[in-house]
Image (tube, helix red, strand yellow):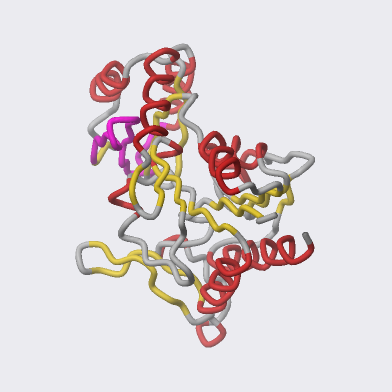
Amino acid sequence: MPVLVASDLDRTLIYSAAALALTMPDARAPRLLCVEVHESKPLSYMTETAARLLTELGDAAVFVPTTTRTRKQYQRINLPGPEPAYAICANGGHLLVDGVSDPDWHAQVTARLADECAPLAEVQEHLLRAADPVWVRKHRVADDLFAYLVVERELLDEDWVKELAVWAENRGWTVSLQGRKIYAVPKPLTKSAAMREVARRTGAELTLAAGDSLLDTDLLLAADQGWRPGHGELADAGFTAPSLRVLPDRGVLAGERILREFLGAVRGA
């Protein structure tokens, strides 16, 4: 039976320059591979060792990139290794099959959101009205499924984020602060539901997952075995679970460690 590996991308397997956390002397820093270019500029990286490990993983398991990014944002990424047959985008709102969104899956998701949550327009209007222009840089809607703000973290009032979370909770939404982005996402819009669908389609009986943010919580709990790095929203909250392995590694070297852990688990299955 195949093993399914569903991994978050940003700050789990790939890292912006600001998130690399290269604390060693410059001469000892790992060689980096650029895996994303945006507007003709390099944007995301992994170590060359991580690239080799990911290639090995793609040959040994069903590797499923699993991200809150929109389809367009995901398609900027050029990961090493075999092209994944499946990818999960928009926090589970889109299940890509050979690069194309599965229309039946997307229809199921949008129907559930309509039944269980306040509409996106209401949340978007609240964000526009309540967020302080002093620290908001951009308002964005992702694939007509959820909304997020790009903010100046040093100016952000984090009590405001807590108040937003309470407001959203009462409307069937959740709030996550990741780097310079504040996400407002409907509760039923989950990576775990899409992961289960891929497991059903592939016949995978063992599922592995990794992630660093609040929006990865359900994915980590749904997998048979999960890993999180020593940085990120979940690390800050001290999140743990019986099936979760907490790694001390931080920054781009955590991505390398996670891939080693995945390969060890796949080969031991």
Q: What residue is rendered at 49% in x and 48% in y?
A: 66
Vertical comparison of 198 with 139: above or below? below
Q: What residue is rendered at 45% in x and 37% in y?
A: 92
On the image, the x and y values in percent for residue 267 come to: 74, 66
Q: What residue is rendered at 33% in x and 64% in y?
A: 43
On the image, the x and y values in percent for residue 160 come to: 41, 25
Pick the residue in front: 208 or 85: 85
Pick the residue in front: 32 or 201: 201
Pick the residue in front: 253 or 56: 56
Image side of residue 203 versus residue 109, left or right? right
**Position of the C terminus by quadrant:** bottom right
Image side of residue 181 versus residue 244, left or right? left
On the image, the x and y values in percent for residue 198 come to: 54, 44
Which stretch is magenta? 138-157
Q: What residue is rendered at 60% in x and 35% in y?
A: 218
On the image, the x and y values in percent for residue 145 come to: 33, 30
Q: Quadrant of residue 83?
A: bottom left
Is 238 included in the stretch rendered in magenta? no
Image side of residue 8 versus residue 71, left or right? right
Of all residues, the one furthest to the left in this rendering is 39
Vertical comparison of 195 with 163: above or below? below
Is 146 included in the stretch rendered in magenta? yes
Vertical comparison of 99 with 132: above or below? below
Total of numbered circles in the picture?
0
**Position of the N terminus by quadrant:** bottom right
